Image (cartoon, grey):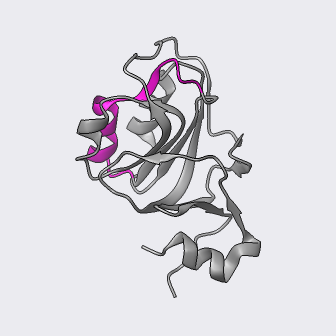
């Protein structure tokens, strides 16, 4: 895994750096991969659908509009992501079951935790460009995350 600090040292002019302070909750503290997106508000039906269908190695980016009223990911959905070989999940929103998720081989970053489950109405959209944290999260772009931060590149950057 290439470190975000090293990427910034070499490619800062080609990268977007996420400015939203996200906490790492998954068992994997460093992860990267192509972005798939979900845009929802307090409803995780499309999150589950995406976790069940995106290719392995993907990082699912969920814009939950920063809501702290409910969790968009819990241990059951995280288990689906692990079973399908996703690299990680980044959420502008909350998760729950954080103790269980911390033991899973999955990168999970979110703004916080909330024990309340989300609605199940299926509202929102998938595979759209998201904007939060001062960056554009475009499906197919590459995201690199570690304990120093999150950076986005339009193309995959190979380790040097």
Q: Residue furthest bottom?
A: 160
First to last magenta residue range? 67-86
Query: Taking the image as drawn, is residue 55 in sight?
Result: no
Measured from the top left, where is residue 46 in percent x and y?
A: 50, 26
Q: Nearer the viewer, residue 23 or 90?
A: 23
Name the quadrant containing residue 132.
top right
Left/right of residue 130 with respect to residue 91 in the rendered view: right
Q: Nearer the viewer, residue 25 or 130?
A: 25
Name the quadrant containing residue 48.
top left
Query: Taking the image as drawn, is residue 107 in sight?
Result: yes
Taking the spot 34% from the left edge, 42% from the top edge, the residue there is: 81
| In magenta stretch: residue 79 | yes
Figure check: 146 above or below 49: below
- Quadrant (top left/top right/bottom left/bottom right) for the N terminus: bottom left
Q: Residue furthest right?
A: 13
Taking the spot 77% from the left edge, 74% from the top edge, the residue there is: 13
Measured from the top left, where is residue 86 in percent x and y?
A: 38, 50
Taking the spot 68% from the left edge, 64% from the top edge, the residue there is: 154
Left/right of residue 24 with respect to residue 99 in the rendered view: right
Figure check: 102 above or below 120: below
Count of picture labels: 0
Taking the spot 59% from the left edge, 17% from the top edge, the residue there is: 123
Measured from the top left, where is residue 59 in percent x and y?
A: 48, 51
Q: Nearer the viewer, residue 25 or 33?
A: 25
């Amino acid at each position: 895994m290439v470190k975000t600090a090293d990427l910034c040292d070499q490619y800062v002019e080609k990268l977007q750096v996420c400015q939203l302070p996200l906490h790492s909750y998954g068992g994997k503290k460093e992860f990267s991969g192509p972005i798939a997106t979900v845009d929802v508000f307090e409803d995780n039906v499309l999150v589950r659908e995406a976790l069940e269908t995106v290719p392995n190695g993907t990082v699912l980016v969920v814009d939950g509009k920063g809501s702290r009223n409910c969790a968009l990911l819990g241990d059951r959905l995280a288990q689906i992501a692990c079973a399908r070989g996703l690299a990680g999940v980044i959420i502008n929103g909350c998760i729950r079951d954080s103790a269980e998720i911390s033991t899973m081989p999955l990168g999970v970053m979110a703004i916080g935790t909330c024990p309340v489950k989300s609605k199940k109405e299926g509202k929102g959209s998938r595979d759209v460009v998201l904007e939060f944290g001062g960056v554009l999260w475009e499906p197919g772009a590459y995201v690199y995350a570690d304990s120093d931060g999150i950076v986005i590149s339009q193309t995959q950057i190979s380790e040097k």
